[in-house]
Image (cartoon, grey):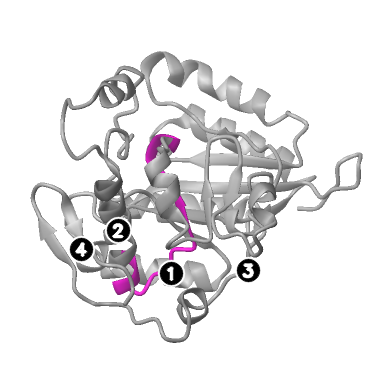
Amino acid sequence: MRGETPTGSPRTIAVALHGIEPATFEPCALIRDWLYDHGVERVTLLVIPARDLHPVGERSPEMVDWLRERRMAGDSIAQHGFRHVRPRAGGSPRQLLAAAHGQRGAEFVGLDSEETRRAVHAGWRLLKLAGIEPDGFVAPAYAYTSALRATLSLKFQWWAGLLRVHRAQPRLEADERASSQIGGLAPALSLATGPLSRVLSPALLRAGSLLPTSTLRLDIHPADLSHPRHMMALERVLARAGKHRSAITYEQLAGVERTSPASRFGAGAQLLPAVNIDGSNGLTADRPA
């Protein structure tokens, strides 16, 4: 996959596979193999740490082994929320507004700063304890709050919004303003599963893939495998992209280098092993000592 824009910048494709958890492991593994067969050597894998309040490392050791192998092969691992569902029904006006717009997975909408911090850190810890290195973070439904954005720099190197991928930990203070521009404008394109959207979204996806952006971002969900029209649309987009674009991960798009835990948190950082589960707020977790 090679090519350049008229200005000389490289043409790339960044594919993100959403909603990876034990219940979706099989279709996700099939989709990842299918992407490789279509020339996508690198993919960003979005992992849900505890969809049903059971840690992924305990529910599916096979999936954890697969994720480790994929990371060693060049894929990037991202934390995809904590449970990928809002922790309580009803709630604040922001939660009701998100529900009205079909954002049932807008997990962090309506949470205060402490609830947000606990959920993010607990999810990170579960992935860490399973031996998975989460490089970045992607909020369910791309629904970010100010509290969530403030929390991400404590654990992650990058985070992805709907329109671009951001660097969460600027290397220099002067990079802070520029970090939001890393990778340029790259809207995430995906296929919807609603009755009307299922009919219209394949054509919209193909049209969106023709936008003159240096990076084509493509979101794929496990449910896409159940819809032949979705897979046909994705195959057409990948066939076209394969002639002009190189596959990259969100980590590469953010312009960060993969680091070890010691270098990320300092040589003296000590990761605490205890994780507590409760029925109201999910998991609680402390910061590195």
Q: Is residue 222 magenta?
A: no
Give the residue type that dot 3 points to: Glu
N-terminal of the two: label 2 or label 3?
A: 2
- How far is disc 1 from disc 4 in space, using C-alphas? 18 Å
- Answer whether residue 36 is visible to the viewer in this image: yes
**Marks 1/3: CA distance?**
13 Å
**Residue type, label 4:** Arg
Residue under the image location 36 percent in, 19 percent down? 101
Task: In the rendered structure, find residue 123 and report the number of the disc placed on it.
Answer: 2
The kind of residue on which mark 1 rests is Glu
Q: Which element is circle 3 on?
A: loop
Q: Residue at x 59, y 27 (%)?
A: 205
In the rendered structure, which segment of residues is drawn in magenta? Answer: 127-142
Reading the image, the residue beneath label 4 is 59
Q: Amino acid at mark 2?
A: Gly
Mark before the other along the chain sequence, 4 or 2 = 4
Q: Secondary structure at mark 4?
A: helix
Q: Residues within 10 Å of mark 4 (few under 14, many from 20)?
A: some
Of circles 3 and 4, which is in front? 3
The vertical placement of 218 against 128, above or below, is: above
In this rendering, which labeled residue sits more in front, label 1 or label 4?
A: 1
Task: Name the residue that disc number 1 marks.
Answer: 133
Report which residue position mark 3 lands on: 257
Between 144 and 202, the residue placed more toward the observer is 144
